[in-house]
Image: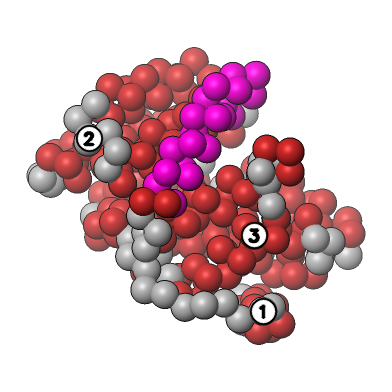
C-alpha cells in the first residue's frame, strides 16, 4: 500500500499544476451516517445484493430532514440498482425496479436543484448502462451533468460527474480524456480531503482509466490498485487491472 501511495504521489507531481479553488460536497452528510456507510460497504466491498436489500429497509428510519432523507433513499436505490448490473447473473429487471423507485422519490426534490440534477443524471446513466441503445437516457444524463457543472461549479461531485462524462463519451460526442484528467487532478489536489471513501475510490479508478487511454500503464496500475484497496468488489475494475497487467 505504501508503494502504491508513493507511486500516486510521483505520478501526480509529474503532471501540470492546476488552478486551486475551494470545493464543497453537499453529499458529505452521507459519510457521517453509520448505517449508510455500512450499506455502501456491503454493496461496494462485498457485492452482496441480498444483504444490501435487507440493510436498505432500515435506512428510511434514520430521522433526517426531508430533503436529506430523500437524497439518502435515492442514493441507496441507485447504488443497489447498479450492483444488479454488475453481479453474475445480472438482474436487470430488479435494477429497473429500483430505478423506478428512485424516479418516484426524485419528484420530492426541486427540479433544477443540485441534488435534483445530479441524482436524475445518475438515474439516467444507469438506464443507459442497462440499455445502451436508449440514447435518450444517455443524452439526458449528459445534459443534467453539464447543467449541474455550470450552475454549481464549486460542488466536487458535479466535477466528478463532468470529468466522467468527458472520459467515457466518444470524442464525436464531446469526450475529451485530457480535459477529464485536468478536472480529476483538480479534485485530487483540492477536494480529496472532503470526499467520501466511495467517491475517492471512483476518483482513483477513473484516473487509472485515463492513464490506460493515454498508454501510461504503470501510472494506471498505481491508481487502479489504490481504488481496489478501498473497495474489493468491482468487476469492471478487475477487468481493467487484468488489461493493465498484460501491458506491463
**Res 172 quadrant in image:** top right
The answer to whether residue 241 is magenta is no
Residue 131 appears in view: no
Circles 2 and 1 in contact, beta carbons < 8 Å = no
Which label number is shown at residue 16? 1
The circle drawn on residue 179 is 3
Mark nearer the viewer, 3 or 2: 3
What residue sits right under mark 2 in the picture? 109
Q: Are marks 1 and 3 in contact (CB under 8 Å)?
A: no
Gap in Å between the C-alphas at discs 3 and 2?
31 Å
Quarter of image, res 213: bottom right
In percent of the image, x 17 and y 42: which residue is there? 67
Residue nearest the viewer, comparing 115 with 47 = 115
The secondary element bearing badge 1 is classed as loop
Q: Residues within 10 Å of mark 1 (few under 14, many from 20)?
A: few
* Any part of residue 65 in sight: yes
Q: Position of residue 7 (x, y in %)?
A: 69, 79
Q: Residue at x 84, y 61 (%)?
A: 215
Amino acid at each position: 500500500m505504501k508503494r502504491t501511495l508513493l507511486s500516486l504521489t510521483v505520478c501526480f507531481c509529474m503532471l501540470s499544476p492546476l488552478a486551486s479553488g475551494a470545493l464543497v460536497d453537499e453529499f458529505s452528510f452521507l459519510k457521517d451516517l453509520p448505517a449508510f456507510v455500512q450499506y455502501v460497504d456491503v454493496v461496494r466491498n462485498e457485492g452482496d445484493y441480498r444483504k444490501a436489500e435487507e440493510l436498505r429497509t432500515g435506512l428510511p428510519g434514520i430521522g433526517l430532514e426531508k430533503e436529506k432523507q430523500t437524497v439518502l433513499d435515492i442514493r441507496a436505490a441507485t447504488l443497489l440498482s447498479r450492483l444488479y448490473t454488475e453481479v453474475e447473473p445480472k438482474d436487470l429487471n430488479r435494477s429497473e425496479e429500483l430505478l423506478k423507485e428512485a424516479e418516484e422519490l426524485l419528484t420530492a426534490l426541486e427540479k433544477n436543484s443540485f441534488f435534483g440534477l445530479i441524482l436524475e443524471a445518475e438515474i439516467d446513466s444507469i438506464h443507459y448502462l442497462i440499455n445502451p441503445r436508449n440514447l435518450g437516457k444517455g443524452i439526458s444524463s449528459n445534459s443534467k451533468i453539464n447543467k449541474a457543472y455550470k450552475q454549481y461549479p464549486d460542488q466536487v461531485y458535479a466535477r466528478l460527474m463532468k470529468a466522467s462524462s468527458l472520459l467515457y463519451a466518444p470524442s464525436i460526442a464531446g469526450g475529451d480524456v485530457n480535459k477529464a484528467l485536468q478536472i480529476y487532478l483538480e479534485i485530487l489536489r483540492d477536494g480529496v480531503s472532503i470526499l467520501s471513501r466511495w467517491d475517492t475510490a471512483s476518483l482513483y479508478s477513473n484516473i487509472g482509466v485515463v492513464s490506460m487511454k493515454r498508454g501510461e500503464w504503470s501510472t494506471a496500475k498505481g491508481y487502479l490498485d489504490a481504488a481496489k484497496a478501498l473497495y474489493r468488489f468491482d468487476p469492471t475494475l478487475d477487468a481493467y487491472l487484468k488489461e493493465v497487467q498484460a501491458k506491463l
